[in-house]
Amino acid sequence: MGLFDEKTENKLNDLIEKAYDAEKGFKTVADHVDNPRLKTFFNEKARERGGHVNDLTNTLRKKGMEVNQHDGSISGSLHRAWIDTKAFFSMDDDESMLEEVRNGEKQAIDDYDDILNNYDLNPTIRELLLKQKSEIQASYNKANYLEGIH
């Protein structure tokens, strides 16, 4: 048996794939906004999510878990296409993009809560996931704040 049972390993690989999707999604959103403050925020979030992918991948590999190659999910690609379409047709691009980011961050928080509350994790992985969830929660809160001032 590996580091975790198969269900837990699948869930961790799914979390990595979704973080990779989020990184690409933030880059996509940054390309669609004109506001320099929002562009900076989205680019920072893309770098942060890239760090999540690398940290989680490297930590799991060091612990002996086989990590799937991540090239993004079909649902992530569809979501980015939706963002592109929404930006093209939206009259209020910045607010629309913030709403999409907020929705994505809420889903990420739910994914982290699921694995933290329902799976058997060792202390190192649990601590890393709690740190990442906290960063995502801060991002969600800031997206709410930024949406409120637009």
Image (spheres, grey):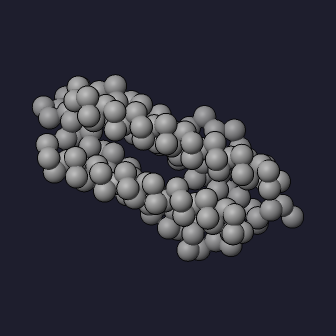
Identify the image quadrant of the C terminus. Answer: top left
Vertical position of residue 94 compared to residue 121: above or below = above
In the rendered structure, the answer to whether residue 83 lies left or right of residue 130 reads left
Please provide percent x and percent y for residue 97. 27, 39
In the rendered structure, the answer to whether residue 1 lies left or right of residue 79 reads right
Q: Residue shown at 80%/56% (left/top)?
A: 63
Q: Residue shown at 68%/73% (left/top)?
A: 120
Please provide percent x and percent y for residue 21. 50, 40
Question: Image quadrant of residue 141?
Answer: bottom left
User: Does the rendering let one see residue 82?
Assistant: no
Q: How many marks?
A: 0
Please provide percent x and percent y for residue 45. 42, 41
Question: Image quadrant of residue 94?
Answer: top left
Q: Residue shown at 22%/40% (left/top)?
A: 96
Vertical position of residue 139 compared to residue 93: above or below = below
Q: Residue shown at 43%/54% (left/top)?
A: 136
Identify the image quadrant of the N terminus. Answer: bottom right
Q: Residue furthest right?
A: 1
Please provide percent x and percent y for residue 33. 26, 29
User: Does the rendering let one see residue 56?
Assistant: yes
